[in-house]
Amino acid sequence: RIVYVNGEYVPEQEAKVSVFDRGFLFADGVYEVTAVLNGKLVDFDGHMRRLHRSLSELQMAMPCDEGELLAIHRAMIEKNALVEGMIYMQITRGAADRDFTFPASATPTLVMFTQTRSIIDSAQAKTGVRVVTVEDLRWGRRDIKTVQLLYPSMAKMIAQGKGADDAWLVQDGMVTEGTSNNTYIVTADGTIVTRDLSHDILPGITRAAVLRCARELQMKVEERAFSVEEALAAREAFSSSATGFVSPVVEIDGKALGDGQPGPVARRLRQVYIEESL
Ligand code: PDD
């Protein structure tokens, strides 16, 4: 694989980042994952807007302008002959002597790599995902897409230890989001419910697209918190992310939803969003 590090495209074995990089020492950095379908970037502008916001919340500067980031993304697709999968981009504050205060001047570290992955023909989209609920012990600014992913990683291990595929995180009895996706339920009257945006969850780029598609299809949408009890009683459930697109959830804490198969709302939204991204 060819990766990108600070202005250079190099084979992955040759890529180097400083031991003193604050991303490595303090998780002082942000990232974006953009899906690639048919060699094309999906919702790139949305990812750029969120990147700007994450950086400014942490008083970090863009390492280069948006046009250049787009050019690097395109070059990465080409150099890695990527047809379907994702591009990971990470910007950390850069290398500095280890100190808790932000360094007055540090050059940001910009890294990118690609990953091939079946998005359209995903096994989980066909069978559906089984989730368990796990207490949300992350920090209070989950709206910033930082690289501190230890707790989501631990939650996913807890889920796998219980024989499930993923965890839905819960705070005060209400679902916040998945380990790396936004979460939705469909109530008995067919309303799609997903948590409203705040510091508690990441404003998913796929979430924005899914809600737009749902409204265009005249589906009823409510943005509000929902409880674990409400989720267990839901007609269907699903999650959204750049890499999973729309993923049907068929089981929560061992209880099958509906007939235990991917639901019609999730399947429809998945199909519509994939079609418009192709
Ligand atoms: N994760 N919530 C969390 C906590 C996430 O990590 C993600 C994305 C999402 C969905 O956001 P989007 O639709 O913009 O991908 C919600 C990425 C895919 C990851 O970490 O791999």
Image (cartoon, rainbow, N blue to C red):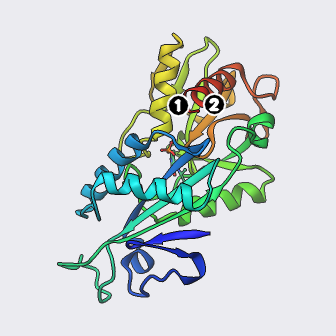
Question: Which of the two residues, 24 or 243, is positioned nearer the viewer here?
Answer: 243
Q: Of the numbered discs in the image, which one, if any, rests on residue 231?
A: 2
Q: Is residue 61 left or right of residue 121?
A: left
Q: Residue furthest left?
A: 104
Left or right, 48 with respect to 16, comes to left
Q: Where residue 77 is drawn, which disc sits there?
A: none
Q: Which image quadrant: the C terminus?
A: top right
At which x and y percent is residue 198? Answer: 36, 41
Q: What is the crowding at mark 2: few (fewer than 14 residues within 10 Å), some, or many (at least 20)? A: many
Counting residues from the start of the chain, the first of labels 1 and 2 encountered is 1
Q: Residue at x 61, y 24 (%)?
A: 269
- Give neighbour class at mark 1: few <14, some 14-19, many 20+ (Cα, 10 Å): many
Q: Where residue 243 appears, x then y in whole percent? A: 60, 46
Kindly state the secondary structure of the residue where label 2 is placed. helix
Q: Which residue is mark 1?
A: 226
- Given residues 261 and 134, the one toward you in this image is 261
Q: Amino acid at mark 2?
A: Ala
Res. 32 in view: no
What is the three-letter code of the residue carrying label 1? Phe
* Secondary structure under the numbered disc 1 in the rendered image: loop
Query: Where residue 268 sits in the image (x, y, percent)?
Result: 65, 21
Residue at the spot x=56%, y=16% of the render? Answer: 191
Relative to 187, does residue 118 appear above or below in the rendering?
below
Q: CA distance from mark 1 to mark 2?
A: 7 Å
Asked if labels 2 and 1 touch by Cβ distance under 8 angstroms, the answer is yes
